[in-house]
Amino acid sequence: MVCREALDRLSPFLDDELDPLVSRDVSQHLETCPSCAAAFARQRDVSATLRRDLEYHRAPELLRARILRDARAAARRAEGAPSGAVAHPGRWVGVAAAVMAVFGGAWQTASLPLTAGRDAVIREAVSGHVRSLMASHLTDVASTDQHTVKPWFAGKLDFSPPVTDFAAAGYPLVGGRLDYLQGRSVAALVYQRRKHVINVFVWPDAHEAGLSAATRQGFHVIVEKHAGMAYCLVSDLNPDELAAFARMLTGAPPPPG
Ligand SMILES: [Zn+2]
């Protein structure tokens, strides 16, 4: 790796957003190149200073939760939906994300309060994600065609997961596989964003619609429930793009068939 390439990647390297191989190359370059290492140190200092100042101004967790709740209620009213129903979760997720951005809370810290059960789901989903990357067992059915992937699940699961290809939006479907979460079989849909793999675990969930975001072991996780389905997205993709994808995924109409 030459200096130009290393310097171009300092910011994602610092945010741990590079895929592992590139990250290793940058790391090796920094060890051998004093001028790039100095540039990296400067960038790290600036970033640490920013984070410290933001920390100082960060809204308390409770206030954040209240703002989220109010934003959700406002979105419901704006949609004219009956209370208790979430007409367009994408709308209030956007509002909530904007509100949290104002408070300087990074997505990593901007999670709704997690119940113990939710936390366990996130932990298991991250394990499933890591396993799928390490064991070369990313997909049981490798296909970019939603009309191939969806029927593949039939007979293997007691529900039919919504499967949509989002290639046109830059999130192509790669395939699917069976996975296991919380003692039950779930659908794992695999998508890609540039070089980042996104695992989407899907299972039926009758509980109230809701959203959680968290970071575990360096992976970003979003759990969103909508229209009777729970979606758990895990990736090393940056949180903003992952959140955008979650909105696309859960707001999409079910594919025909
Ligand atoms: Zn260099």
Image: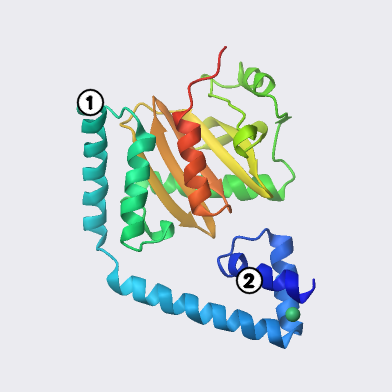
Q: Which mark is residue 253?
A: none
Q: Nearer the viewer, residue 58 or 133?
A: 58
Q: Position of residue 236 (x, y in %)?
A: 58, 54
| Contact, mark 2 vs mark 1 (Cβ under 8 Å) | no
- CA–CA distance in space, label 2 to label 1: 46 Å
Residue 2 lies, with reference to residue 256, above or below; the image says below
Q: Secondary structure at mark 2?
A: helix
Crowding near the residue tagged with mark 1, few <14, some 14–19, many ≥20 C-alpha atoms within 10 Å? few
Image quadrant in which you'd find residue 229: top left
The kind of residue on which mark 2 rests is: Leu
Q: Residue 164: which quarter of the image?
A: top right
Quadrant of the displayed image that contains ligand 1: bottom right
Give the amino acid type for the residue marked by disc 1 in the picture. Answer: Gly
Q: Which residue sits at x=70%, y=86%?
A: 35
Give percent across and percent down for residue 111: 36, 53
- Colour scheme in use: rainbow
Residue 219 in view: yes
Instruction: Mark yes or no: residue 124 visible.
Output: no
Query: Which residue does the image show at 63% across and 86% down from the upper left?
Result: 38
> Residue 98 versus residue 123: which sits nearer the camera?
98
* Circle 2 Cα neighbour tier, 10 Å, few/some/many (<14 / 14–19 / ≥20): many
- Mark 2, ligand 1, within 8 Å: the answer is no
* Residue at far top of view: 257
Figure check: 226 above or below 29: above
Q: Say which residue appears at 52% left-offset and 40% top-offset.
A: 245
Residue under numbered circle 2: 10
- Residue 91, percent across and down? 35, 37
Measured as percent of width and height from the top left, residue 119 is found at 40, 49
As drawn, is 218 to the left or to the right of 168?
Answer: left
Q: Secondary structure at mark 1?
A: loop
Q: Name the residue tied to disc 1.
A: 80
